[in-house]
Amino acid sequence: MKILVGIKRVIDYNVRIRVKSDGSGVDTDGVKMSINPFDEIALEEALRIREAGIAEEVIVVSMGGNECQQQLRTGLAMGADRAIQVDTSEKLQPLTIARAFLKLIEKEQPGLVLLGKQAIDGDNSQTAQMLAALWDRPQATFASDMNLSGNTATVVREVDAGLETIEIDLPAVVSVDLRLNEPRFVKLPDIMKAKRKPLDVISIDELGVTSENDLQISHYTPPPARGKGIMVESAAELVAELKTRGLV
Amino acid sequence: MGQDFDIVVMGASVNEIASEAAAIDGAATIIAINAEHLVSPLATNHAAEVVALAGSYSHILGPSTTYGRDLMPRIAALLGVNQVSDISAVEDTYHFKRPIYAGNAIVDVHAPETAKLVATVRVASWKAAGIEGGATVEEHSASATASSHTRYVKLESGGGERPDLQSATRVISGGRALASKENFDLIYELADLIGAGAGASRAAVDADYCPNDMQVGQTGKIISPDLYIAFGISGAIQHITGIKDAGTIVAVNKDADAPIFEVADIGLAADLFTVIPEMKQLLG
């Protein structure tokens, strides 16, 4: 079977986020961009499934302008067979992304779609669920373990109460959580090899998808600052301070 | 938003919960749907019910818990609308604020007034509603049958009788510095002494010192207790985002340069293995 993996170009998770002084957005000038960490884990899982002989092709997909080819090439270097850039200059919202993904699914007919559970910029956690809904297929979100057997996947999900296990029939959409795996490092020879792997560009218009009823997002502000704190010198001082404040 | 709202409860025998929900201030009707296949919180089944009811509502809200986050986007897509995630403030009926970039930026979101509004609400940003209400409970039968392609197997709970992390007024948390599963007993004992919930950093959970349901942070639980004490937690951005709205943040860490001291209201640069026993003595 084929596996489609969605990857998003985001500000690297180590970068200290700064809001622009005019409130129009977050500062991205000269800032390091990377594959969304959860998406990397999704790709790693797809590669392991292929290496186990259960899938024959891993296709990595990103939606955006040509700059996302950088992340697609990294995905190819990690081991994906083919990459697809859905070209758009718009900042797509999850519902539109899901619709575009569905068009790719119609073409590629994958048995499994793996996505990160959330992007660390938007923190929405919507795309996988929306795609599953539009596709009328199962969703297994926040996966921390996954086992494929024939046409079924048994997925362990990280939920508030602990670990939930569900069984889903393929084809399906799975969104992955941090503890599913540890992604491999990219080695230099693989980066060179990746340059020869196919990277197809298709515009979102060609897919026949348009944004509708988008949310308008504006007025980026930094979070309210907390007041300055104090340092204490001992456990005794700490407990005394907590008692004074009526906290213990 | 100052409007009346209805609450839907789904499961196999939810009438008791429905009556409890009826006491929530502002609720007009509690819709109780009893069906065997709704016992397990499978998004595919629950979404079908909510979508069947959605017609007469302008706004459909869910909590930003793993249940709500799994379920609400499926509902939104089935209704053909975008979703607002993690509402932290309401400015107007279709105008909200929410955190993005792990809470490092807050944005204004305007949803189109011509479409249904589907959203999750950031639980840590809101105080619980009062319980002086008197809604009516309406029993409905399920609109859909069980989805055949998704099956619930089981839930393994972290268990324990400590206060639920998400609603506890005080939380004691441990980080990787605890160094072992056994050492986490220090955290549990201190928590039990003052009746607090117990949490952990992602690093501690990754190292298998404690179960995943204790994880506090951007990709774990986002909480707002009155008191949060972090032992041996360095204070990565992703952890801080889980506790930004706590009343008082206390940090105990051997490393005086740990970033957590930048957000802590009270800081103690000392070894947790010395401090915790001393605190237990003083509080015991």
Image: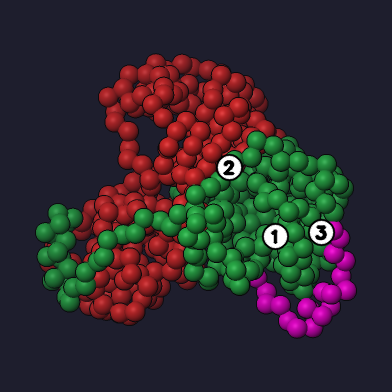
Which stretch is magenta?
A183-201
Describe residue A5's horizontal placement relative to residue A246 as left or right: right
Read off the residue under disc 3.
A84
Letter of the chain in red: B
Choose the circle earlier in sequence order: 3 or 2.
3
Q: Position of residue A174 (x, y in %)?
A: 67, 51
Chain bearing tag 2 is A
Q: Are marks 1 and 3 in contact (CB under 8 Å)?
A: no
Mark toward the start of the polypeptide (2 vs 1): 1
**Camera-side residue: B232 or B17?**
B232
Q: Is residue B51 left or right of residue B148?
A: left
Of circles 3 and 2, the one toward us is 2
Q: Position of residue B156 (x, y in %)?
A: 49, 51
Specify the chain shown as green: A
Say which residue label 2 marks.
Answer: A216
Q: Dot 1: within a 10 Å radius of its alpha carbon, few (fewer than 14), some, or many (20 or more) residues?
A: many
Applied colour scheme = by chain
Identified by mark 3, the residue type is Ile
Q: Earlier in the sequence, mark 1 or mark 3?
A: 1
- Pointer 1 residue: A7
Residue name at image x 49 percent, y 69 percent: A16
Question: Do callouts 3 and 2 mark residues in contact (Cβ within 8 Å)?
Answer: no
Which amino acid, by three-letter code, is at mark 2?
Gln
Q: Are marks 2 and 1 on the same chain?
A: yes
Q: Residue at x 33, y 37 (%)?
A: B128
Q: In the image, residue A169 lies at what x, y percent?
A: 73, 44
Quadrant for the C terminus of chain B in the image:
bottom left
